[in-house]
Image (tube, rainbow, N blue to C red):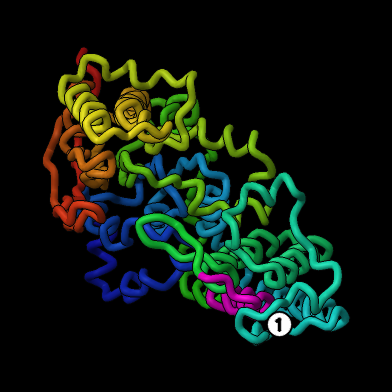
Amino acid sequence: MSTIAQARTNGNNKLRQEDRAVHNWYRFVLSFPPHLVRDYLERFDVGCQQNVLDPFCGTGTTLVECKKLGITSIGIEANPVAFFASEVKTDWGVDPDGLWQHAQEIAGIAFQKLEKQGIDDDGCLPLFSDTTGDFADLRSPPSESTKLLLKNSISPLPLHKTLELLETLEVHKDTRYYQHERLALTKALVFSISNLHFGPEVGVRRPKPDAPVVSSWLDCVREMTDDLQTFNNEANTQTVVYNADARATQNILEPESVDVVITSPPYPNEKDYTRTTRLESVLLGFINNKKELQNLKKGLVRSNTRGVYKTDTDDLLVAGNREIQRIAKAIEQRRKELGKTSGFERMYARVTKLYFGGMLRHFAELRNVLRPGAQLAYVVGDQASYLRIMIRTGQLLADIAESLGYEVVGIDLFRTRLATATKQKLREEIVVLRWPGYSK
């Protein structure tokens, strides 16, 4: 019986808490659900002696689920703040009582600092009032960093209080708790302190003049400590996370070291995934200038036009794939018919080829680290973002994998969703593969 099946048989209610515990310390809004990971761990009959890889691990959904079940796992993530989140979310060795006590001490110091400045942390200033004139010397990041932020993504007073809290965390750092406290702040920033909202793309609500900062952060720490107490029995299960490019797995992992892959790579669309985490990436110092942002984007599979560079060559890898070339040609033809001439629209066809070329490079490299018989599940979705030309992502990735020697076990329907522009039903699917090993 598999590890996950045993857990269910034994009535382990921890698995029913997945929608709140651990995952909610910090996660992308569009991440795939924990139950889907468990379903494929069970389907693949994964045991404690096997290694599970998530090469696009994001904020760690697959890794957390494996750790809950005592399964060794490996994550790869190119986005530094998501990598940070995955690392911290899978570090369950911290003492929750000690973390809570230290966080309360930090909060007390931060409250005192703000009080001396005449600032409350209740977030109850009159809505849409002019707050910048009420307080002198409000802090802000260096100008080069500020330019990277979405306009009005955080209001001046909450920003000032956030920077004061970050400084307090730095000055009174306890290395046992520091990273967990910073991760709690990333969640508070995104969901309580900022003006951000999430739909098909990250956006900015009408700015609010103030918001609780220290108290919101403390609430997130409290949630974290509750979860750590729930799951401390699994703290010793090994989880390793690499801040790296998923197209270069053989530079990171040992040959034939992976038994199972469960992941959700990006889709070809116009979502710039670095914008989703831009606020916390800048304020916590993961990205400080345009050059660092550019370097980050160069380490990602090209899935949107904001991350395309002249030196990119992944599109050449699919020059012989007729269906991908047909789709790219159809996108370019539609662009011309509609008279679309912006720089981004001119890149739609190329980014489509770059995306699938990048995924081909990923699958090709991955073969070297897979054990013969390895099982793989890729959660992907259809797209029609590029001038309403349909891209059947799952089928195309299955075809690419098959051309590289993988066996296509099937394409399972996960759910359907309506396309924003066309209202067409788009499929979200799990491409299930098997690596038989190299022919001898």
Q: Is 123 situated left or right of 252 in this image? A: right
Query: How many numbered marks, from 0 up?
Result: 1
Relative to 224, residue 325 above or below: above
Relative to 261, residue 223 above or below: below
Asked where in the image residue 112 lies, by quadrant, the reply is: bottom right
As for residue 378 lying within the magenta part, the answer is no
Relative to 212, residue 357 above or below: above
Q: Is 70 situated left or right of 275 in this image? A: left
Depth check, front residue: 389 or 278: 389
> Badge 1 is on which residue?
121
Q: Where residue 204 sits in the image (x, y, percent)?
A: 50, 63
Q: Where residue 146 sits in the image (x, y, percent)?
A: 69, 51
In the rendered view of the protein, which quadrant contains the N terminus? bottom left
Q: Residue at x 15, y 30 (%)?
A: 407
As for residue 207 lying within the magenta part, the answer is yes
In the rendered view of the protein, which quadrant contains the C terminus? top left
Depth check, front residue: 265 or 128: 128
Which contiguous range is marked in magenta? 206-224
Q: Residue 367, can we see it? A: no
Q: Residue at x 14, y 54 (%)?
A: 425
Dot 1 crowding, Cα within 10 Å, few <14, some 14–19, many 20+: many
Q: Could you tell me the amino acid type at mark 1?
A: Asp
Q: Residue 132, can we see it? A: yes
Q: Is 331 situated left or right of 53 in this image? A: left
Q: Residue furthest front?
A: 339
Asked where in the image residue 129 lies, by quadrant, the reply is: bottom right
Q: Where residue 80 sits in the image (x, y, percent)?
A: 57, 45
Relative to 11, residue 341 above or below: above
Q: Residue at x 17, y 28 (%)?
A: 399
Q: Residue at x 16, y 20 (%)?
A: 322
Q: Mark 1: which secondary structure?
A: loop
